[in-house]
Amino acid sequence: MRIYTRSGDKGKTSLIYGKRVPKNDLRVEAYGTCDEANSMIGFGLSFLNEVEWDEKQAFLNAMHRIQTILFHVGAELATPSDKEVTWKLKQEHIDELEKQIDAWDATLPELKNFILPGGTQAASALHSARTVARRAERLAVGLGDELANPYVVSYLNRLSDLLFVAARYVNQQLAGEEIPLQADV
């Protein structure tokens, strides 16, 4: 199988089920941004290859599951609203994120003010992934009634929350610094 098809050379791409749309279509922007968030998560995780902590494998397993579900979110966004999605996002997927957020957050010091994104390279990449997930959420909201499954927006919203907590969790595990936002500038 060839990687290139040449079918997009004139600025159009196919949604699932073959409908052709411009590559700057809002639906394409939304699922492309999910792919970007997924890649940024993978980039963040790559910084963990050489470090160890007791719960590292459990953390990686959770993040790999999230990456897999994020591919499915992209598939939902790539499916025209008048077509059936093979794999549907459900409330249980959002509940799973919330459970993980709560578990990691319970190990972290309470936030008393905003923090600047940063710390370790892994945490910084996860903070970046969070902002990309927020952009994907905004794009999905822009689809309005064209988005058949309301859980997509909810999942992306919760995913960005999870990525914030994941970045803090990684910083804690790797002794990364959290710099509080200074009110006076």
Image (cartoon, helix red, strand yellow):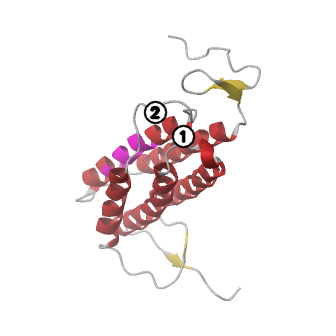
Q: Is residue 49 visible?
A: no
Q: Residue at x 36, y 51 (%)?
A: 93
Chain part drawn in magenta: 62-70
Please identify the residue farthest to the bottom as the structure is shown. 184
Compared to 20, does 104 lie above or below?
Answer: below
Q: Amino acid at mark 2?
A: Val
- Residue in front for this viewpoint, 123 or 71: 71
Q: Main secondary structure of the magenta part?
A: helix
Q: CA distance from mark 1 to mark 2?
A: 18 Å
As helix, strand or loop, the secondary structure at mark 2 comes to loop
Q: Is residue 128 visible?
A: yes
Q: Which residue is mark 1?
A: 35
Residue 67 among those drawn in magenta:
yes
- Residue in front for this viewpoint, 166 or 10: 10
Q: Is residue 107 left or right of residue 164?
A: left
Residue 169 location, x and y as percent? 37, 66
Residue 114 location, x and y as percent? 54, 78
Please identify the residue farthest to the right as the structure is shown. 10
Q: Earlier in the sequence, mark 1 or mark 2?
A: 1
Q: Which residue is mark 2?
A: 85
Q: Is residue 86 left or right of residue 127?
A: left
Which part of the image, by quadrant, shows the C terminus?
Answer: bottom right
Residue 34 location, x and y as percent? 54, 44
